[in-house]
Every structure is written in structure tokens, then in C-alpha cells.
Image (cartoon, grey):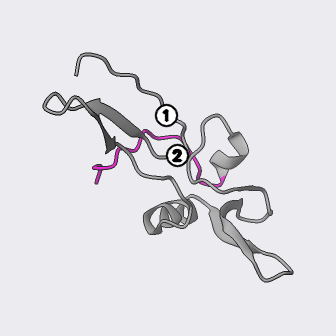
Amino acid sequence: MTQCVFFEHIDSRIILGELDDATGKIVAREVSIDNKPDDPKEKARIIKSGGRVFAVEYDDGVDGPARVWLKHMDIPGLAMSRSLGDTVAHSAGKFFKNWKKNEK
């Protein structure tokens, strides 16, 4: 591969498209994982940092996605476990880290 374009959308998975020299086709390769608050490791990290993780329960019986909340207030309520530049979310255990898929 002679060229590479890289960006990170913080709360989403990164997929890298690589040109397969043998076939001449672009092959997708997962580079990271989704940063979701209900992932067991992420949830433990958030709770240890003073945040809470739960889904909003609506009157119609349909629950929303798991969200991160401050320990004593129902804010910020973001449905991702990592954030960049959000000081309220940071105090609930959400912070940016470039998390690669194969990281232990």
C-alpha cells in the first residue's frame, strides 16, 4: 500500500481500506472497536472514574442505548464511552484515548 488516509471519529469503529496487490481489490480491515458504554471493560472504567452507565427507560417499553451519566446528575447522557474536549463527560469517566482493536 503506497497511500493511507486515517481519521478517527472517536465514538465509532475505524475500518481501513487496503488495496490487495494480488487481486487489485480494496479489502476492509477493522482497526479499532466501537467505544460503547455497555462494553464490560468500558463500563467498569466509567464506574471507577465516578460515572454511571444505564439506558433510559421510556414509557412505551422501548429502552434507549446505554449512556454515560454523572454520578449524582442525569447529565451528559452520551451513548459513547469516549469523548474529546467535553469537560462534563470527562468528569463522568469519558475521555479520549486512541484505542486500537488489538490493544489489551
- Identified at 52% across, 40% down, the residue is 96
Q: Give the magenta range.
A: 92-104
Of the pair 34 and 20, the residue shown nearer to us = 20
Residue tagged 2: 12
- Identified at 80% across, 63% down, the residue is 74
Residue tagged 1: 8
Reply yes or no: does residue 95 show up in magenta. yes
Q: Amino acid at mark 2?
A: Ser
Residue 27: x, y in percent? 29, 39
Looking at the image, residue 97 sits to the left or right of residue 81; the answer is: left
Which corner quadrant of the image does residue 87 belong to? top right
Which corner quadrant of the image does residue 49 belong to? bottom right
- Identified at 49% across, 34% down, the residue is 8
Where disc 2 sits, the SS reads loop
Residue 47: x, y in percent? 57, 65
- Identified at 64% across, 61% down, the residue is 51
Of the pair 16 and 91, the residue shown nearer to us = 16
Which corner quadrant of the image does residue 83 belong to? top right
